Amino acid sequence: MSAILEKNPLATLSLWSRRLPAELGILLVLLGIGLAFELFGWAMREQSFLMNSQRLVLMILQVSVIGLLAIGVTQVIITTGIDLSSGSVLALSAMVAASLAQTSDFGRAMFPALTDLPVWVPVMAGIGVGLLAGVINGSLIAATGIPPFIVTLGMMVSARGLARYYTEGQPISMLSDSYTAIGSGAMPVIIFLVVAAIFHVALRYTKYGKYTYAIGGNMQAARISGINVKRHLIVVYSIAGLLAGLAGVVASARAATGQAGMGMSYELDAIAAAVIGGTSLAGGMGRITGTVIGALILGVMASGFTFLGVDAYIQDIIKGMIIVVAVVVDQYRNKRKAKR
Amino acid sequence: MLSSVTGAHSVPAVLPTPAAPEYLLEIVNVTKRFPGVVALSDVQLRVRPGTVLALMGENGAGKSTLMKIIAGIHQPDAGELRLRGQAVRLETPLQALQMGIAMIHQELNLMPQMSIAENIWLGREPLNGLRMVDHGRMYRQTRELFGRLRIDLDPKMAVGELSIAGRQMVEIAKAVSYDSDVLIMDEPTSAITEKEVAHLFSIIADLKAQGKGIIYITHKMDEVFAIADEVAVFRDGTYVGLQSAESMDGDGLISMMVGRELTQLFPERRVPREEVLLSVRDLGLEGVFENISFELRAGEVLGIAGLMGSGRTNVAETLFGITPATAGEIHIDGERVRMDDPCLAIRKGLALLTEDRKDTGIFACLSVQENMEVAVLPGYANRGFVQQQRLRERCEEMRQKLRVKTPSLEQCIANLSGGNQQKALLARWLMTQPRILILDEPTRGIDVGAKAEIYRLIAELAGEGMAVIMISSELPEVLGMSDRVMVMHEGEVTGFLDRTEATQERVMHLASGSPVIH
């Protein structure tokens, strides 16, 4: 039998391709899109798309917030789940954090009696709110067996409502300098990359990561292998919530305001980033590096289309098509994997 | 040519006229490869009209693969199929059905919430003038069909309310309702009682008289003698030979199937020790099984035999804490344990190799190593970080010990053959160093060579003092490996047989619920 394996050219090819980084394909797509915009840039506007540091910095800053959500969502999707609530949880966290980060020089929207708080208070409050939402998501899913789609859909609607109810729809501005510093300069990018590195390592080299893949690969087999599946799912959804909270802090600090409409439909961009990056909705497969590249692809496209002056509605049409193509490729890849 | 064939087709109960081709279906030099295995190698088979061709061979011999090719589920890599003399390509199951090939699958494919009639006519419902489903006509057609087949069931009943045997009869009726020329039956009697078997055989006799060709897969020798006109034998993906009814001989068939004496397959066993590791008293799971009591000694292999649905797998799952017992007690080392979680079971030294490798065993998208290591990760983690090097060495050691054939530990487990997947799963459990090993169908769907290795391993482990519970539907295996056999029927133990007194006949009697004949 091993002789057959050795002779099978497909098997040798798959062994050989295993040595290449799994993200090579998607990385080439990213480079291809960048180069395409570069060419169009010269052809249509006679300027470079890539050789413009200001534009690139802006793009990476925009990617950072969605990237933070996508890192959490990737882990949820690996367990065969989904998190639709991340955009709304971002908004709620942003509101709560901003309300505690206001300077006392003007009237406070909330808690008028408060004086200026140290910066860690609003930061922890924002992250805490996200974590709490994640714990609720995970506990409901683990305890009741309601599909993650429904539970997080409920959280998406409720968290958005709560974010509006919190200040009756009023935005919160006049945030302290120490708080807005979190969103200025390269800070969002640094936070994003550090978080990405942490979870890249966690997924690949820790028990947490191995259990996450095992649960996504075969939940029943994982349970029989002695994994506490319910507890682990709560942890995964809690991490996703925590990262949405962190994203809310970063977003409100960067905008120097908290608004209930923040992060609208970001959850879909986050899911798209994960899927484009090779995370399988069937579970058990997906990597943080892929998700980061997926988020960059979305960012480059948005930035590139704006640069070329493409209509925003048409941008959405093309974005939608790219997501579907990514899933088609994903399914094709799975099928080939199953056949091999 | 084609018109004459369709003409013969529409007139039933006619023996083939000289103009009609001699064979309904011919398989010519078909080869099918799966990753890591050649499932079928240069195989041939011919089905004559008005005959029953029995197909025999061990699990993994390639019978099911061949049937799936005939039914349009798989495509052959080489060779061709001829239907009434014409070469055909069957790309989908629907195409096969339209060409006149119907299959009764081993695993039942019915929708439990829908009625019997809806299940039978699924996808070809009779319509009324308004293009709506005509339920009245559907029930009438079903009653007619059941009348012809002498099946006594109400077409309006939901399939979910039927017994396993009842569902099997519905499957058979559904296959017959296509009015196909070639009917494939894949172990249709594995879940039904003797009375229903007799009923099925009478249906088969009718179909034969109508000039249909039937391919009948079975493991049971007596069935072959009862209904087959010819027997084709497969072994390890090759066609071994054919025997016709006149010159059929049981011993000859067995040696054709196995290719060696059965005695060589099962290793020598040592006598079990005195020490009782596991004792089960009046164990029950409401509505599934009750009053299960036995003791398991170190070094003992206890076989559990019974038909599908007898509760054997449920007992294993309850012992392992997957479905906690609703009655009775489990004692391990004389200490009572409330087994309500697989984690606890693993801590107490139990291991369970589950029945369905795909559903509850492997992580298909993960590597061989990731599949092996999953149950022992806590022991190889340092502040959450997995000690990759140590773990890898341990997995490599187990890979060699169990002779798992894989290009590397990084290989995706789905690419391994069934036998090697099973050995990797066994490695997963042996790495937890269990003292009580529960094996549920440990050799299902794997080839003879891998089987022999698993038997050798079980004997070795028992020799080292491990207690083993082995659930299997293959009687030779249960009898060859076990010190004692516990036989179950519909959730109850119908008897224990010692190694010396256990025979296939006695086990079958107990498994079908009738008292043992001494």
Image (cartoon, coloured by chain):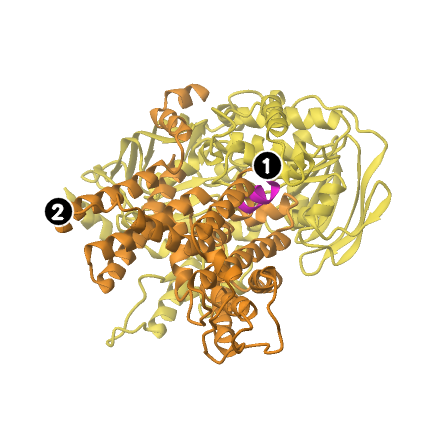
Q: Residue at x 60, y 35 (%)?
A: B373
Dominant secondary-structure state across the stretch colored magenta: helix
Chain letter, disc 2 residue: A
The chain letter of the orange chain reads A
* Dot 2: element: helix
Three-letter code, disc 2 = Ala
Q: Where does the image place residue A130, in percent across and percent down from the top left?
A: 55, 62
Quarter of the rendering occupied by the C terminus of chain B: top right
Position of B385 relative to A111 (above/below): above
Q: Which residue is mark 1?
A: B474
Q: Assess whether residue A209 is covered by the magenta stretch.
A: yes
In depth, the one of B9 and A309 nearer the eye is: A309
Q: Which residue is mark 2?
A: A43
Q: Residue at x 77, y 28 (%)?
A: B465
* Dot 1: element: loop
Q: CA distance from mark 1 to mark 2?
A: 73 Å
Residue segment shown in magenta: A206-213
Q: Where does the image place residue A265, in percent across and percent down from the top left?
A: 39, 64
Position of B337 relative to A82 (above/below): above
Q: Assess whether residue A296 is covered by the magenta stretch.
A: no
